[in-house]
Amino acid sequence: MIAPVRTVTPQAPVRTELRVALDLARDLPQLTDPMRAEYHASAALTEAAVSVSSTAWVEELPPGTLVKPDRRRKPGLTGPRAMRFDGSTEHELWTGLADAIVAAAETGPDVVVDVATLTGAQVVALGRRVSAAMSNDDALRERLVRVATEAGEQLWPMPLPPELRASLDSPVADIANIGERFGGMLVAGLFLAEFVGTRPTADADDDEQRIPWAHLDIAGPAFNGGSPHGYTPTGGTGVMVRSLTRLLEDVARNGA
């Protein structure tokens, strides 16, 4: 049984905004099991996000109905213009999640954390019980791994190798949303990192700094198709709810 969420009263005002971007699989009869997994993951994570700040939702539809040209790079949002290259629902979600990250960063929050069942490569690399953490900030990534361990969830730190970034280059767009197949989970993280905004800094030598951001890929752990284990049921697992709650408690106590 999952313990009730505790209320933590900050010792001092906390201005941190932690924004969580989620992807939602639409509940259609032709949904595949992986898409149902994303539906369960998004629904569960909403419980953690409701008390945080805001959520962003993205439809995932079967091929043939997923392309909606009017929904690429929403008006008023800044950042690279991503160009779609294939009919994969996975890569369509890359651009939708990028939109969510841009929107989350618009108010200049202290931290942006996105959680998504984003790549099949995550399952290949880490299996069905270990989620992946990628970040543009080493301290944030280490903090997320620590609070996940405290919450009883498995979260493994992963790199963002700069040499893989070239596979996202495009001759006709600022960035492509499909790249190197090997290391695909890391390539997806590098794609998302391009959309993280900046905020003003007090440093006289640096007018702006990149907002600390982390990407949690929960593709494998989001859905348990086998027998229950520990507090994890069969079906949607709600993975990372405990970790995000623990992160919020940690921020309330210690600041961003």
Image (cartoon, grey):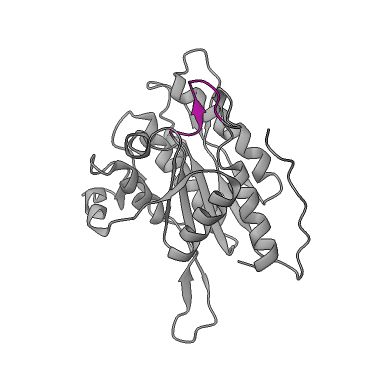
Displayed quadrant of residue 239: top right
In the rendered image, is residue 244 in sight?
yes
Looking at the rendered image, the quarter that the C terminus falls into is bottom right
Residue located at (47% from left, 14% from top): 30
Location of residue 154 in the rendering, given as x and y in whole percent from the top left corner? 49, 44
Residue located at (75% from left, 69% from top): 13
Determine the main secondary structure of the stretch shown in magenta: loop
Left or right of 15 on screen, residue 204: left
Location of residue 242 in the rendering, given as x and y in whole percent from the top left corner? 62, 44
Location of residue 79 in the rendering, given as x and y in whole percent from the top left corner? 42, 56
Location of residue 92 in the rendering, given as x and y in whole percent from the top left corner? 39, 35
**13 vs 158: above or below:** below
Question: Which of 208 and 46 lies nearest the eye of the viewer?
Answer: 46
Residues rendered magenta in the picture: 220-229
Q: Is residue 7 magenta?
A: no
Question: Which of 88 and 18 lies nearest the eye of the viewer?
Answer: 18
Residue located at (57% from left, 34% from top): 42
Question: Which of 46 and 198 lies nearest the eye of the viewer?
Answer: 46
**149 vs 32: above or below:** below
